[in-house]
Image: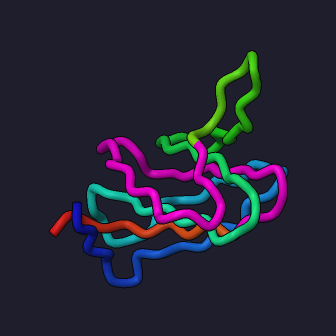
């Protein structure tokens, strides 16, 4: 699948041990490309809830989906109701979120 980013559609979030929640990047689009430029795995949740935290999964409790450090970007299809991103990491990681569409 080829990805076409939206103009000014990228946000940077510094993920750390405290869950952070931000609005999706501007510009619309049905896809979200996620790239972790840090050294630690980041865990991401997508929803419409501005208070929803992301969690690091454990053996007994589910958490966000992993975005591995220094790997090719992960592209996910957004649901129509997704308006927020929550992210957490065991260490510090720079995570880029870009909205776009397929070509």
Q: At x 31% / y 76%, what residue is drawn?
A: 6
Q: Quadrant of the C terminus?
A: bottom left
Q: How many marks?
A: 0
Q: Quadrant of the N terminus?
A: bottom left
Q: Nearer the viewer, residue 39 or 100?
A: 39
**Closer-to-camera residue (75/49):** 75
Q: Is residue 42 left or right of residue 3?
A: right
Please tell me which residue is depicted at 60% across the width and 73% down the height of the picture. Answer: 12
- Is residue 13 rendered to the left or right of residue 83? right
Q: Is residue 82 magenta?
A: yes
Instruction: Name the spot of residue 95 as percent of width and height, x first.
Output: 62, 66
Q: Position of residue 27 (x, y in %)?
A: 33, 72
Q: Image quarter for residue 25?
A: bottom left
Residue name at image x 64 percent, y 71 percent = 37
Identify the magenta region: 66-93
Most foreground residue, 100 or 35: 35
> In the current view of this chain or complex, which residue is farthest to the bottom?
7
Q: Residue furthest front?
A: 71
């Amino acid at each position: 699948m080829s990805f076409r980013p939206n103009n000014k559609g990228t946000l940077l979030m510094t993920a750390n041990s405290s869950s952070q929640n931000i609005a999706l990047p501007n510009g619309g689009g049905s896809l979200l490309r996620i790239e972790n430029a840090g050294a630690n795995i980041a865990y991401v949740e997508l929803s419409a809830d501005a208070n929803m935290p992301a969690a690091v999964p454990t053996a007994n409790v589910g958490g966000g989906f992993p975005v591995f450090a220094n790997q090719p970007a992960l592209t996910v299809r957004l649901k129509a109701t997704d308006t927020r991103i929550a992210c957490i990491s065991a260490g510090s990681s720079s995570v880029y979120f870009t909205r776009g569409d397929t070509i």
